[in-house]
Image: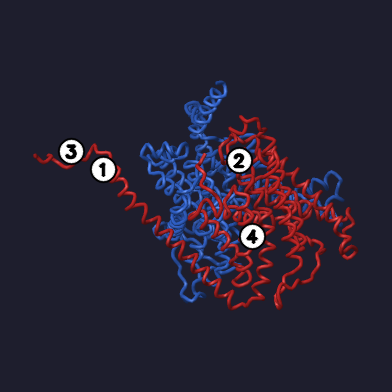
Amino acid sequence: MPLPSSFSAVFVNNYAMAALVERLRTSVVAAPTASVINVVGAVVVVVVAVAAAQRIYQGGPAYFIQTMGFGLAQGSIFALVALGYTMVYGIIELINFAHGDVFTLGAFFSLALMPAFGMVEGKISGPALILPLLGLFVITMLFCGVVNVIIERVAYRPLRHAPRLAPLITAIGMSALLEGIMFVWKGPFNLRYPDFLPETQVTVFPGATVAAKALMVMGVAVVLMVALTLFIGRSKLGKAMRATAQDSDAAQLMGIDINRTISATFFIGAVLAGAGGIIYGLYYNSVAAFDGFQYGLIAFTAAVFGGIGNIPGAALGGVLIGIIAAISDGYFNPAWTQVLIFSILIFVLVFRPTGLLGMRVPEK
Amino acid sequence: MTAIQTYVRAHMREPNAIAYAALLLAALLFPITVQFATNGNADYLVGLAADGGVYMLMAIGLNVVVGFAGLLDLGYAAFFAIGSYTYAILASDHLSITPLGHSVHLPFWIVLFVAMFVAAGAGVLLGAPTLRLRGDYLAIVTLGFGEIVPQVFSNGGVWTGGVPGMSALDVPTLPFWFQGPWVDQPLALTTETFRFTTSNLTAYYVLMVVLIIGVVILVNNLQHSRLGRAWMAVRENESAAAACGVNTVSIKLLAFSIGAATSGFAGAFYGAKLSYVSSENFGFDVSVTVLAMVVLGGMGNIPGAMIGSIVLYFILFQFLPNAPAQFQQLATSVGLDSLNHATADWPGLGEEVGRMKYVVFGLVLVGIMLLRPQGILPSQVRKQELTHSGHHEIAQEAK
């Protein structure tokens, strides 16, 4: 049997061979870089986790419980804000930069509204507070919802079919505008937010206490999140929102009013942010016009962490980010907390772009 | 006159050529005009223009990233910070107080390029793992990076000067081969000598103009090269570009690091001009301002980005800071002097106008995107693409 004149003559048109070469090439070139990056990532995570565990062990259980209480409380506020980011991103793939400022607007608006409800510090306390506080929550939440719907109507809807960059820039513009309005209204100072919540400490087990404030914050956040889950899962509008997020064209063909659904999403996101704003004020007793942007970025990180577009993911991400921030504040240097949080953002996107609970979505 | 007319007629179809000519003319005439107009007291304005040049350089660099390659970078100020801090560390007494114990005083002209390469290196480090991601994930990563870098510099303790930053950086000098009879001689049109001193800002202005001309020539050549066409292909349709044999990841990485290099370059100049760096000068607002300049001017068009940077810089750094005083004068002259005085719930007209800065900025951003999304001087290629795709969409809707 004669040998082929050259090996290439046999192999050139051989698709199987071409595929094999391609596979070899990718395995040689791509896989090691990817696995090196993954190994580096895993090592960094393990080192940080071990360092944290060691400090937590040294700090003792009482301090840990206190830190966790703080972390869960601030995590619930992050979660409330993160839900708005994730819902809006899920439905129109837009990072609504103005969302963080809607959150601050909630705190500012409720602060201005308090005297109308007779809520003056020192004059009212205890059970008498429940009714005015409820009214305050409802009106502020509605107000924030309406503001966010107007923002969507003015700044995002006309650009829905424009290039991706356009609505992002109007979002940044709207954020600056809201900050500017609050700045003109109240100036650059830290405003004092009345302290209505009890200062008592609740003993969780002998020797370890958690602030009652923190438990109340968690309680309100849980109630709101359960309400949101029920709304998204059970109501007709919630179903429409899920359908639009999945495939807006198909949803439109099924007779869903896309514009109405998107407005509703912005409304609900802002309602949660407004409630978050009040809770933030009551918990930290201080608020300033420019707080919202940074806070919003952290909440957005939480949304990405949990899986952007995924509602339980945003709640989980918010709580985790809150706990991580509290551990970093309590056991490490608070000056590095922000660096840590934004490093988590980059890490998650590099190693697991879908977040903790997200699923892989093809680029549209 | 006729020469200008024929030139303008010949280039009617190329607004870019006219824009370049007008910009060059304006750059030459600006210091002379303002010095004459204010009887030689316009050093402040010339220095302001040199600072504006820093933003213009950044806008040109970001235009490569956002305009040419279509990558959204929301942390562009991070590279600016890296450039500035590189200059501050390599050209000041600062290192002598660190554990190293020795200060380094490299010449300005060398650090300018060192800063450029350091920033480009940071761009590669950040871009290499993240440019594989979807478009807006890149925006998020850069946003996070932009938040991290200034914070790291402000936490850097003795190495980066901590929160107060570093001051008393070296003043640039002309390179030795540039010394000649004109050094220390009065220039014809100004009464100062052409030296880099804090009192004479014309030298910085001239240097800035030279740097910008150099960068514009380089970026312009890149745009019309094979690389530039690859960027455009990636911007318009990444899958199609990849199918045509464009290595999309390395092309995007190049755009990202060239943008970062320009920003680092601008950062080194900024540090030298200000003789001071602090982490507070490199926040998200800087990134957004530069992005707004590119968008306002016209994405993907170099003279557009330059004009956008001039317009926005004038509004943000000349018009708005001066607005409170002018409004106060106006109120006094129309007999409403009482408005100028602060009361319990009215902080005074000046303060109130000063606070309007963010409102104006927000309105400018939203207004441009809604009213003229293509910018002041849009890219001709892009315009064609936009109108073409418009027809396509109309045809689709008709079906």
Local SS, label 4: helix
Q: Which residue is mark 3?
A: A9
- Tell me the amino acid under the disc marked 1: Met
Q: Position of residue A193 (x, y in %)?
A: 79, 61
- Quarter holding the N terminus of chain A? top left
Q: CA distance from mark 4 to mark 2?
A: 24 Å
Local SS, label 3: helix
- Give the letter of the red chain: A
Give me the disc on residue A17. 1
Q: Earlier in the sequence, mark 1 or mark 3?
A: 3
User: Chain B in the picture: what colour?
Assistant: blue
Local SS, label 2: helix
Q: Earlier in the sequence, mark 3 or mark 2?
A: 3
Q: Is residue A201 visible?
A: yes
Give me the disc on residue B138. none
Q: CA distance from mark 4 to mark 1?
A: 51 Å
Q: Residues within 10 Å of mark 1 (few under 14, many from 20)?
A: few
Q: Which residue is mark 4?
A: A319
Q: Nearer the viewer, residue A75 or A342?
A: A75
